[in-house]
Amino acid sequence: MNSRHTTSVLNVIVAALGIAGLMAIVAVDSYIGAALLAVAAVLAVSQRSQLARSIRVRDSDRRRHRLKMAAVFAVVTVADVAIGFTDLANDESWGTKAVIYGAISYVAVGATICYLIAGLLTRKSPHHTITAPALP
């Protein structure tokens, strides 16, 4: 595994542990969720230099791509909540449907936050800068 793949896997592991911890706390209200969040925080803090290097890339469109992905996941979240509410409005027992809608929205919210933070921390490319026209 090269360095780029290692840092990508590290990002995925930290995000997955954080999302799983939040889901366990909210859905089950267990101490396992707190433990998963603690492990994600310790991993993120201990590997922060490697995580920072993985965010800094030289691809000029990386920032735009990450912000677009954050917007897509935000739309997925809103659509999931809207569809879930309309689907579950007339049901007397929500059961499995509510769990599925909740899981989709938790993952989409987590991905939105991760992509938004990564997009905002990525430097703007120098060739996409807007310059003011020269005054006559």
Image: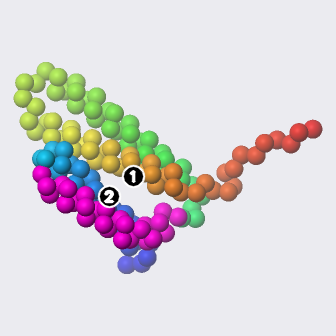
Mark-to-mark CA distance, 2 and 1: 7 Å
Residue 37's image quarter?
Answer: bottom left
Mark 2 residue type: Ala
Q: Which numbered disc flags the more N-terminal residue, 2 or 1?
A: 2
Q: Nearer the viewer, residue 93 or 41?
A: 41
Q: Main secondary structure of the magenta part?
A: helix
Q: Position of residue 97 (x, y in %)?
A: 14, 36
SS for dot 2: helix
Q: Residue at x 34, y 39 (%)?
A: 76
Q: Position of residue 108 (x, y in %)?
A: 32, 45
- Cβ atoms under marks 2 and 1 closer than 8 Å: yes
Q: Residue at x 38, y 36 (%)?
A: 75
Q: Nearer the viewer, residue 40 or 53?
A: 40
Residue 18 visible (yes or no) = yes
Mark 1 residue type: Cys
Q: Which mark is residue 85?
A: none
Instruction: Left or right? Give the position of 19 relative to 92.
Output: right
Pointer 2: what residue?
15
Q: Residue at x 43, y 76 (%)?
A: 3
In what quadrant of the picture does the N terminus appear? bottom left
Residue 51 falls within the magenta-colored stretch: yes
In what quadrant of the picture does the C terminus appear? top right
State which region is magenta: 30-56
24 to 47, vertically: above or below: above
Instruction: Left or right? Give the position of 33 relative to 133.
Output: left
